[in-house]
Image (spheres, rainbow, N blue to C red):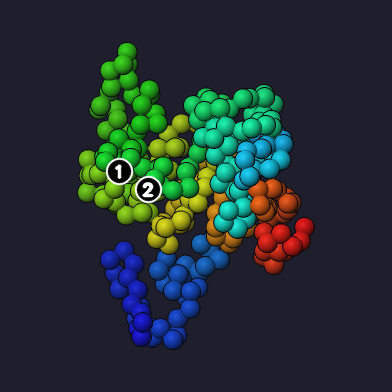
């Protein structure tokens, strides 16, 4: 373009020649803060080991993977597309059962073959592709928001619809969710608002470990800070351990306490989040440790 006009919350912010713009300046105008404030580092008290994975194997994408994550810790996973990051989370959560290896939650060895077993063990998963595996597009915002905690809203199998409405409306306000009604089909919401609903649904129950894959992919920059706040709030409120996958290296290095780097299905190193982007990039390409 020759010229760029930025609006925020329905209000004109600025009009600039494209030649005078760069990515950082554009994001700053769109969200009302500098880029380094978009990925804030929030320290937390880190406790005992919650999840231990040893020698996990599944096909060609998960090869002898071992790692641990502690209460209050955010462990990031970095790697190029096809490195096996997402497959590790899917295997831990039981979407695709492991061929071998050990998974321990709070010191107890588990055989997780299906997602319901992971849920019963206190694990939660925010899926990588909200369109395909996150939202139920033909259902309402209310149904998508409440379904994970549906047992909390029923007595002897009878739903307490008034309680569902009350809880979902409270979530709607807390999320600053932009929808004309809770009856609106979730598929009609923007990507950022769909992601807020998915977060609300997953966080409607307590977790020991929350697995988060691509939480801000395809959402507007104005929703990024809110989504980060919700993830950090879950860690602080529940003392949960969090595993974070993102293609945005800035997001991983800013939020994580440690980073597990993957290459061709293997963890090639677990490093401090302060490790330089250059070193991380070389590890992700399989040319350095």
x, y percentage for residue 231? Answer: 51, 46
Q: Are marks 2 and 1 in contact (CB under 8 Å)?
A: yes
Q: Residue at x 35, y 37 (%)?
A: 145
Up-down: is 126 above or below 36? above
Residue found at x 40% / y 69%: 30
Foreground pick, 265 / 243? 265
Residue 220, image x, y percentages: 39, 60
Question: Which residue position holds label 2?
Answer: 131
Q: Check the picture and name the quadrant holding the N terminus.
A: bottom left
Q: Residue at x 32, y 13 (%)?
A: 156
Distance between the alpha carbons at the discs numbered 2 and 1: 8 Å
The picture quadrant where one finds residue 63 is top right
Would residue 208 appear left or right of 11 to someone viewing this image? right
Q: Is disc 1 surrounded by few (<14), some (14 to 19) or many (20+) residues within 10 Å?
A: some
Q: Give x and y (percent) for residue 49.
A: 69, 34
| Position in image of residue 10 (x %, y %) | 28, 66
Pick whichever, 205 or 279, lies toward us: 279
Picture layout, residue 68 above or below residue 8 = above
Image position of 230 (left or right of 143): right
How packed mark 2 is, by other alpha carbons closer than 10 Å (few <14, some 14-19, many 20 or more), is some
| Secondary structure found at label 1 | loop
Q: Find residue 59 and name its label.
A: none
Pick the quarter of the image with the C terminus.
bottom right
Q: Is residue 137 visible?
A: yes
Instruction: Using the image, tell me which numbered label, if any, was put on residue 137.
Output: 1
Q: Secondary structure at mark 2?
A: helix
Q: Earlier in the sequence, mark 2 or mark 1?
A: 2
State the residue in front, 114 or 41.
114
Q: At 67% across and 37% down in the image, what residue appears? A: 56
């Amino acid at each position: 373009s020759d010229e760029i006009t930025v609006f925020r919350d329905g209000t004109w912010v600025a009009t600039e020649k494209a030649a005078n713009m760069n990515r950082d300046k554009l994001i700053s105008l769109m969200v009302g803060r500098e880029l380094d404030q978009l990925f804030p580092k929030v320290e937390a008290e880190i406790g005992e080991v919650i999840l231990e994975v040893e020698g996990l194997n599944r096909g060609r994408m998960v090869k002898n993977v071992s790692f641990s994550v502690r209460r209050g810790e955010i462990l990031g996973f970095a790697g190029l597309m096809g490195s096996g990051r997402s497959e590790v989370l899917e295997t831990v959560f039981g979407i695709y059962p492991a061929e071998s290896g050990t998974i321990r939650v709070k010191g107890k060895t588990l055989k997780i073959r299906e997602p319901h077993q992971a849920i019963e063990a206190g694990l939660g998963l925010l899926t990588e592709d909200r369109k395909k595996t996150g939202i139920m597009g033909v259902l309402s915002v209310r149904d998508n928001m409440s379904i994970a905690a549906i047992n909390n809203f029923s007595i002897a199998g009878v739903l307490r619809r008034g309680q569902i409405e009350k809880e979902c409306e409270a979530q709607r306000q807390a999320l600053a969710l932009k929808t004309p009604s809770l009856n609106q089909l979730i598929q009609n919401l923007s990507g950022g608002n769909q992601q807020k609903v998915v977060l609300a649904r997953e966080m409607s129950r307590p977790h020991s470990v929350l697995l988060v894959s691509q939480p801000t992919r395809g959402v507007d920059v104005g929703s990024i800070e809110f989504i980060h706040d919700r993830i950090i709030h879950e860690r602080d409120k529940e003392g949960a351990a969090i595993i974070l996958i993102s293609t945005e290296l800035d997001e991983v290095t800013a939020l994580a306490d440690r980073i597990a780097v993957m290459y061709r299905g293997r963890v090639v190193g677990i490093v401090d989040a302060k490790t330089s982007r250059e070193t991380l990039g070389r590890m992700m390409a399989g040319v350095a440790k």
